[in-house]
């Protein structure tokens, strides 16, 4: 009976820890003492209400952030956080200048997807990866009025602030055209850009998984 109680308690502990770890985005540990991270918050304006955009394999938003060589930084993202819209982050970055040019909508053109599969001779699952450069991905870039330049220092988490987008699909889920997920540019704009907003750093402070503790040691909000 005692063994059963110990086993049950251990099982509950494992489940609790798994649930706790699932509350926070997956992150790699710092690969060096000087490794840094960039974060930003993104939201959708729906009739004045800020909402989370659920990135899906047919329609995704990504920050257009490039490093000093002009290489696009491949962000990770999380959308299921409490009291938070879209959280974008990229860990293990080197110090240097990074430029946020705007935001890019990446959608799947179903006609191009079909052509790709016919040429390949097989059907593949369309993944939720806006950076895979598949030929059926279509990119729509929406620039900021003024690019945000970040001089990223070593050994730090730096926030690019908060951004809100308002947009309209050509057809969306009810459509039948190959480019139903295309964004209508005349109805789309960045309605808020606040690179000075540092509230995200405060939001991240309590994240206490093993890897996030390592990153939060670099969080300026924890050094006040």
Image (spheres, rainbow, N blue to C red):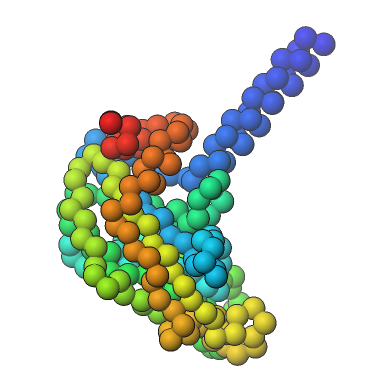
Vertical arrangement, residue 76 with respect to residue 158, above or below: below
Vertical arrangement, residue 205 with respect to residue 120, above or below: above
Q: Is residue 76 visible?
A: no
Image point (50%, 83%), residue name = 182
Vertical arrangement, residue 21 with respect to residue 144, above or below: above
Task: Please provide percent x and percent y for residue 41.
Answer: 41, 55
Task: Please provide percent x and percent y for residue 90.
Answer: 36, 52
Task: Please provide percent x and percent y for residue 39.
Answer: 35, 51
Image point (53%, 47%), residue name = 83
Image point (52%, 79%), residue name = 168
Q: Nearer the viewer, residue 119 or 7?
A: 7
Q: Is residue 124 visible?
A: yes
For the C terminus, which image quadrant? Answer: top left
Vertical arrangement, residue 167 with respect to residue 119, above or below: above
Task: Please provide percent x and percent y for residue 45.
Answer: 50, 67
Furthest residue in direction top, as rendered: 2
Total numbered labels placed on residues in the image? 0
Q: Is residue 65 left or right of residue 69?
A: right
Image point (39%, 46%), residue name = 200
């Amino acid at each position: 009976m005692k063994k059963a109680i110990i086993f049950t308690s251990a099982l509950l502990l494992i489940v609790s820890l798994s649930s706790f770890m699932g509350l926070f985005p997956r992150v790699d540990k710092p690969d060096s003492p000087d490794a840094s991270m960039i974060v930003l918050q993104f939201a959708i304006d729906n009739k004045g209400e800020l909402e989370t955009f659920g990135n899906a394999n047919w329609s995704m938003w990504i920050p257009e952030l490039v490093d000093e060589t002009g290489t696009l930084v491949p962000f990770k993202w999380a959308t299921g956080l409490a009291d938070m819209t879209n959280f974008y982050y990229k860990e293990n970055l080197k110090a240097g200048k990074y430029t946020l040019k705007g935001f890019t909508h990446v959608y799947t053109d179903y006609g191009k997807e079909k052509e790709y599969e016919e040429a390949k001779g097989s059907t593949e699952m369309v993944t939720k990866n806006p950076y895979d450069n598949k030929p059926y991905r279509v990119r729509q870039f929406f620039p900021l009025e003024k690019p945000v330049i970040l001089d990223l220092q070593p050994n730090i988490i730096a926030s690019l602030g908060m951004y809100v987008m308002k947009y309209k699909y050509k057809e969306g889920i009810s459509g039948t055209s190959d480019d139903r997920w295309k964004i209508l540019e005349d109805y789309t704009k960045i309605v808020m850009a606040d690179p000075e907003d540092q509230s995200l750093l405060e939001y991240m402070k309590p994240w206490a998984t093993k890897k996030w503790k390592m990153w939060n040691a670099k969080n300026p909000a924890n050094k006040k």
